Image: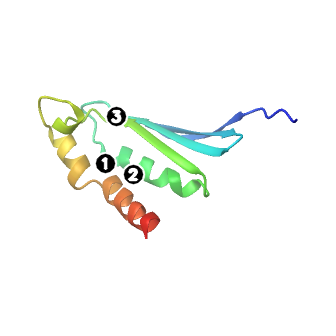
Amino acid sequence: MSLFVPFTIFLGSKENSVSIKISGEKGTLAIISAYSFPAKNITPILQEIKETPMNISNEQALAGADLNAHKRRWGYATVDNRGIYLIESSPLTQYTRRRANLLSS
């Protein structure tokens, strides 16, 4: 029986995001994390997240971000323009929908 030692590779960081790869017995997972200050424009941050998977080959990927956006479906009592933008018209939402359609067809 061989001993597998998982490892983490730092992929890179940008102004608002960081990405790593974690390798384990069952494959590799790329993780992308981003943050936006409440007063900052989120469009460039969404673009960073959108561009990162292009640098990842066929591994599974998980993207998470604290974008300080409010929407009732996320448990907030209020809705703000960021929340509306993320759900309805952000480039990341459109990219995710296209990718999901490709994967399901």
Crowd band around label 2 with a 10 angstrom C-alpha radius: few (<14), some (14–19), many (20+): few
* Residue at 38%, 66% in the rendered image: 101
Q: Which amino acid does label 1 sit on?
A: Thr
- Which quadrant, please, contains the C terminus? bottom left
Q: In which quarter of the image is residue 26?
A: top right
The residue type indicated by label 2 comes to: Gln
Packing grade of label 3 (10 A; few <14, some 14-19, many >=20) is: some
Where does label 3 land, which residue?
Answer: 36
Which residue appears farthest toward the bottom when viewing the image? 105
Query: Which residue is label 1 attached to?
Result: 43
- Whichever of callouts 3 and 2 sits on the residue coming sooner in the sequence is 3
Question: Residue drawn 30% across and 43% down?
Answer: 42
| Marks 3 and 2, how far apart at CA | 12 Å
Helix, strand or loop at mark 1? helix
Residue type pointed to by label 3: Ser
Q: Give residue 51's position: percent from left, percent from top.
A: 47, 54
Binning the other alpha carbons within 10 Å of mark 1 as few (below 14), some (14 to 19) or many (20 upward) gives: some
Residue at 21% x, 54% y is: 88
